[in-house]
Amino acid sequence: MIALQIKNVKNFMGKLLTSDLFDAYLLSEATIATYNTFIIDGRQNQEFYTSEEWREPSVRPYDFSMWKDMRTICFQLIKGRRTPVSFKFVFHLIPAYVESILKDGSVSVPLELIGALVLTLKYDSSGLTLTTGTSLSTFLPDRSLDIFWDKYNKLFLENAGIDFEEK
């Protein structure tokens, strides 16, 4: 796990909220503090769906909502003349992408043990920080997944033109 301080918050926020750069993620949770504090639980609500829809992968492919579907809602809550007091977004990489980025074999952790590859974005008066994390279904002393995920995110940010420094 690493924490990366984003140097140009405006550039990053433009990419987060108005582009598809983070569309490979699911939104686990969001808290946005502006004139009110808005809390979004990204877990999809079973009561909203019929029992057939709930079981249908084409209707509800994941337990969490896709960021691309939540992006405009979050943008509406954040945009305005005033900067938010704070916000926090917790993202999980979509499972198909997890499998795709781990195909090179550099990680020895079996896919079925990986619960999530996580990014947490936190903004407050001290700036914007991106923190990486992994979730496994069991304890493993093997840190290869953590090391891979940390390197992957640094490269991802560099390729996206996002300046950062490691905290």
Image: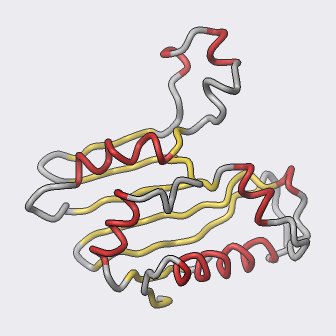
Q: Quadrant of residue 99?
A: bottom right
In the visual, does 122 lie left or right of 117?
A: left
In the visual, does 119 lie left or right of 39?
A: right
Classify 129 as above or below 71.
below
Residue at point 48%, 47% (across, down): 67
Percent position of residue 151, x then y: 67, 82
| Colour scheme of the picture | secondary structure
In this view of the protein, which residue sits in the foreground, 136 or 104? Answer: 104
The residue most toward the left is 81
> How many marks do you count on the picture?
0
Classify 83 as above or below 137.
below
The quadrant of the rendering that contains the N terminus is bottom right
Percent position of residue 135, x then y: 70, 58
Residue at point 40%, 62% (across, down): 16
In this view of the protein, which residue sits in the foreground, 149 or 69? Answer: 69
In the visual, does 163 lie left or right of 60?
A: left
Classify 69 as above or below 132.
above
Residue at point 91%, 72% (across, down): 105
Percent position of residue 167, x then y: 47, 88
Q: Quadrant of residue 58?
A: top right
Classify 152 as above or below 83.
below
In the visual, does 45 lie left or right of 107?
A: left
Percent position of residue 24, x then y: 59, 54
